[in-house]
Image (spheres, rainbow, N blue to C red):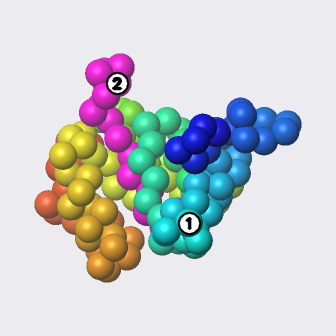
Amino acid sequence: SDDANIPSGESDFAPPRFKPAPDVYLRAASYVGGGGGLPPARCVAVEDSASGVGSAANAKIGLIVGYVGASHITDKDGHARMLMRGERSEDGRGADVVLADMADLPAVVAAFGTGGGAAVRGASWVRLPSCSS
């Protein structure tokens, strides 16, 4: 971890704890909220990999946002479906929503902050890739 308290599965744990282990998200949750930490259920994770979504799910993060807008993701629909399947989580939970445009993230986080995960999941104002589960 660096001076900004950015947790790393490799450098913060001995032995290293890589995703989909929940450790990096649990450590991150302990840093937010003015230094006192927040319960993972009140946190938001943004992930573009199955292992990352699995890690967030295994940590019981309140809202998992899948992201398919990065240039290295060429099959956005297929990648979105994979993120939502939850292949690497212990309980099969996948991304709650998937964004193709990071500009949508502030609205998603705001909705989660006022109404929890149910306020975000399936919301029609979130621009999703054109896919179905």
Residue topped by disc 2: 73
Sooner in the amino-acid sequence: mark 2 or mark 1: 1
Q: Residue at x 27, y 33 (%)?
A: 69
Where disc 2 sits, the SS reads loop
Against 121, is 67 above or below? above
Three-letter code, disc 2: Ile
x and y, in percent, of residue 40 in the image: 57, 67
The foreground one among 45 and 86 is 45
User: Which labelled disc corresponds to residue 80?
Assistant: none
Q: Residue at x 36, y 33 (%)?
A: 78
Q: Residue at x 71, y 33 (%)?
A: 10
The foreground one among 101 and 43 is 43
x and y, in percent, of residue 30 in the image: 62, 63
**Which residue occupies the extreme left position in the image?**
125
Q: Residues within 10 Å of mark 2 (few under 14, many from 20)?
A: some
Residue topped by disc 1: 35
On-image quarter of the N terminus: top right
Q: Is residue 119 magenta?
A: no
Q: Residue at x 38, y 71 (%)?
A: 117
x and y, in percent, of residue 72 in the image: 35, 20
Where disc 1 sits, the SS reads loop
Q: Is residue 64 magenta?
A: yes
**Residue mark closest to the camera, 2 vs 1:** 1
Three-letter code, disc 1: Gly
The magenta region covers 59-76
Magenta span main SS: loop
Left/right placement of residue 51 relative to residue 47 reads: right
Q: Residues within 10 Å of mark 1 (few under 14, many from 20)?
A: few
- In space, the residues marked 2 and 1 are separated at their CA atoms by 35 Å
